[in-house]
Image (cartoon, helix red, strand yellow):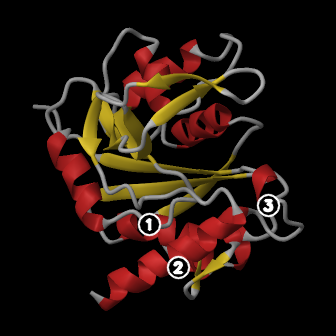
Amino acid sequence: MSRPSKHWVVIPAAGSSRRMASSGPPKQYLQLAGRSVIEWAIAPFLERADCERIVVVLAEQDQHWSELPLARHHPRISTALGGAERVDSVRAGLRALVSLADEDDWVLVHDAARPCLRATDLSRLMDELADDGVGGLLAAPVVDTLKRADASDRVSATVPRESLWRALTPQMFRYSVLDRALHAFRDAGAPPTDEAQAVEALGLQPRLVRGDPDNIKITLPEDIERAARLLETWSAA
C-alpha cells in the first residue's frame, strides 16, 4: 500500500526587487514588524508539522540569508540556487526535493515577499485540495471595476469582473504535475507568471480556493507599511 501524500514547500527567493527602487537589500530581506519579510512568509509553514521540508531558493550572490536565525538553526529548512526567472527557481526547488518527494506528493510554492499569509488560509488550501486531481491556488475574487487601456493610457473598454480572480500564493500541485508543467515551459518562450499558468498549459484546470485579499506581495515601498499595519492588527486581535 502506498504511503499518504506528503507536503513540501518551495520558496522562490532569488528575485532582485527591481520595482522597489532601492539600493538596500532585496525586498524579501526588508525589516517588517521585528522580522524580515521572508521570515514572516515562511512562518505559517513552520507552524505545521505536516510540511516536511521548506526549500528556500536563493540567488547565487545572496549575502543576506545566512545572517537570519532560520538559516542557521531550523532542521526543516534547506536551500538551493535559483535562476534568472521564477520558473527557474521553482524548478531548482523541485530538483532539491527529487530524492525525497514521491510523484503524488504535494508541493506548495509561496512567494518570499508575501508576509501576510494567514494560517487559516493555508489550512483551507491544504484541506480543500487534499483529494483534488489537479491542485490549485489561493485566490481572491476581483472586486474593483477593471479598465482596459489603449496605447495612450485612455480607457478602451470596461472589463466585466464577474468570474475574475486575483492569483495569490501558495499554489499547490502534485510534484509530478508541477515538474512536468515547468519542463514543458522551458523552451516555450515567455516564462509563466505563476505555477498555475504552467499547469493550465497542460490542459488542466487548477482549482481556485478563496483566500484573504490581504495576502499581499511586497512590490512597492508603500507595501511594507501596509503589511506592517496588517500584521499589527492581526497580533492585536
Q: Amino acid at mark 2?
A: Ala
Question: What is the quadrant of residue 62 in the picture?
Answer: bottom right
- The mark nearer the N terminus, 2 or 1, is 1
Tag 1–tag 3 contact (CB < 8 Å) = no
Residue at image point 18% right, 30% down? 132
Q: Amino acid at mark 1?
A: Cys
For the N terminus, the quadrant is top left
* Residue 223 in the image: above or below residue 83: below
Q: Amino acid at mark 3?
A: Asp
Horizontal side, residue 77 vs residue 46: left or right = right
Question: Label 2 neighbourhood size at 10 Å, few (<14), some (14-19), many (20+)?
Answer: some
The CA distance from mark 1 to mark 3 is 23 Å
Residue 201 position, x and y percent, is 46, 12
Residue 72 position, x and y percent, is 61, 77
Task: Give the structural element (helix, strand or loop) at label 3.
Answer: loop
Horizontal side, residue 37 vs residue 213: left or right = right
Residue 227 position, x and y percent, is 52, 72
Q: Residue 228: which numbered mark, if any? A: 2
* Residue 118 in the image: above or below residue 212: below
Q: Nearer the viewer, residue 8 or 181?
A: 181
Q: Residue 17: which numbered mark, if any? A: none
Residue at image point 36% right, 31% down? 161
Horizontal side, residue 64 vs residue 103: left or right = right
Question: What is the quadrant of residue 224 in the picture?
Answer: bottom right
Q: Which residue is mark 1?
A: 116
Question: Label 1 neighbourhood size at 10 Å, few (<14), some (14-19), many (20+)?
Answer: many
Q: Which residue is mark 3?
A: 62
Q: Nearer the viewer, residue 184 or 157?
A: 157
Question: Label 3 neighbourhood size at 10 Å, few (<14), some (14-19), many (20+)?
Answer: some
